[in-house]
Amino acid sequence: MPGFIQDKLEIKFLILYIAARVVEPVPFDAILDLTLCDEAIDYFDFSDCLADLVRTEHLTLSDDGLYALTEKGRRNSAICESSLPYSVRRRCDRNLEDWNRKLRRRRQVKSSVEKRPNGTYTVKLSLNDDKGGVMDLRLMVPDPAQAKAVSRRFQQSPEKVYSQLIRLLLAEEE
């Protein structure tokens, strides 16, 4: 099935459309993945268009490799988005919904591991919602394997950890 995007200008419109809708700056691979929602776009045209949008100051590229929309890009995106085929915008919106959910989740659930001077490890776990902090927890574990396991399991199901901790803390004493 051929794609609907016909030229580099439409690829640029699509990139701006995407950049206007992601909830935070994103790396190259994220924009690439979201832009390839149309079968007519190839990697090399995409790369050229992305570089042009940075050069023309529609997008910025941070030192850590994240792309973000500028005010100029926002204005031009709003003007040009209606020229994108409706089917491409719909497909793109569905993909953006998934990406934004993942980005929000990554912001809400954090874990890190630090080595302590005595050779043990501190695992820092935090869970946030849209209004702020829900839980901040620091645990001491004896070795790096346990620290990584605790961090990984928390990332997989922080709500379960939170609810079990609350249930334990609110349980009647025997």
Image: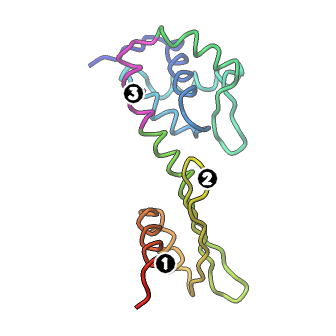
- x, y (%) of residue 95? 40, 33
Front label number (2 vs 1): 1
Front-most of 102 and 135?
A: 135
Say which quadrant the C terminus sits in. bottom left
The answer to whether marks 2 and 1 mark residues whose Cβ atoms lie closer than 8 Å is: no
Name the secondary structure under disc 3. loop
Q: Amino acid at mark 1?
A: Leu
Residue 132: mark:
2
Task: State the residue position of label 1.
Answer: 169
| Colouring scheme applied when the structure was drawn | rainbow
In the rendered structure, the answer to whether residue 151 lies left or right of residue 55 reads left
Q: First in sequence, mark 3 or 1: give its number.
A: 3
Q: First in sequence, mark 2 or 1: give its number.
A: 2
**What residue is shown at x 44% (from left), y 88% (from top)?**
173
Q: Quick check: 78 above or below 124?
A: above
Q: How many marks?
A: 3
Q: Residue 94 lies in magenta, yes or no?
A: yes
In the rendered structure, the answer to whether residue 13 lies left or right of residue 115 reads left
By secondary structure, the bulk of the magenta-drawn segment is best described as helix
Q: Residue furthest bottom?
A: 174
C-alpha distance separating marks 2 and 1: 22 Å
**What residue is shown at x 26% (from left), y 19% (from top)?**
1
Name the secondary structure under disc 1. helix
Q: Amino acid at mark 3?
A: Cys
C-alpha distance separating marks 2 and 3: 34 Å
Start-end of magenta stretch = 84-97
Q: Amino acid at mark 2?
A: Gly
C-alpha distance separating marks 3 and 1: 48 Å
- x, y (%) of residue 155? 47, 63
Task: State the residue position of label 3.
Answer: 37
**What residue is shown at x 44% (from left), y 25% (from top)?**
42
Q: Residue 55 lies in magenta, yes or no?
A: no
